[in-house]
Image: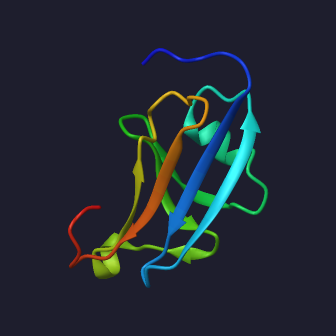
Amino acid sequence: PGTSAGRKQVTVEVVYSDGSSETYRASTDALYLEQAMADMEGLTVEGSRTEAFGLMVLTVNGVTADYETDGAYWAIYLDAQPVEDGQHYRLVYQPADAPAA
């Protein structure tokens, strides 16, 4: 997708399995969400990378979602989306028995 150059204000909301959430903000020149998240103080995102799917998030702020163990996963909404000024993105822990948000 096309990207937007220049400084942008971006928000990422992390929603945990218990429904609690934390919000992170960055003023960034990043073109894509993965880059913008790296600019957010206090937000840690770890995972593995595949050629077909890119970054597969496994752990956010020390909380691991292990699909192989319990069917849970971290869902990133708009992860491949170019970063746009003022956009709000959600990183949601999805337990196996919950419908996608």
Q: Is residue 46 left or right of residue 20?
A: right
In the image, is residue 53 above or below residue 6? below
Q: Is residue 14 left or right of residue 17?
A: right
Q: Nearer the viewer, residue 75 or 21?
A: 21
Q: Residue at x 38, y 39 (%)?
A: 53
Q: Quadrant of the N terminus?
A: top left
Q: Residue at x 55, y 76 (%)?
A: 63
Tell me the quarter of the image containing the C terminus.
bottom left
Task: Please count the marks in the image.
Answer: 0
**Residue drawn at the location 31% of the way across and 76% of the way down:** 95
x, y (%) of residue 27? 76, 38
Q: Residue furthest front?
A: 86
In the rendered image, residue 75, in percent from the top left (x then y), is placed at: 38, 58
Q: Position of residue 65 (x, y in %)?
A: 43, 73
Q: Nearer the viewer, residue 16 or 47?
A: 16
Name the residue at the bottom extreme: 18
Colour logic? rainbow
The image shows residue 12, relative to residue 62, as above or below, that is above
Locate residue 9, reporting x and y percent: 68, 37
- Residue 80 vs residue 46, the one in the foreground: 80
Query: Residue 7's image quarter?
Result: top right
Q: Is residue 61 left or right of residue 73?
A: right
Measuring 25% from the left and 62% from the top, which residue is drawn there? 100
Asked which quadrant contains residue 28, the reply is top right
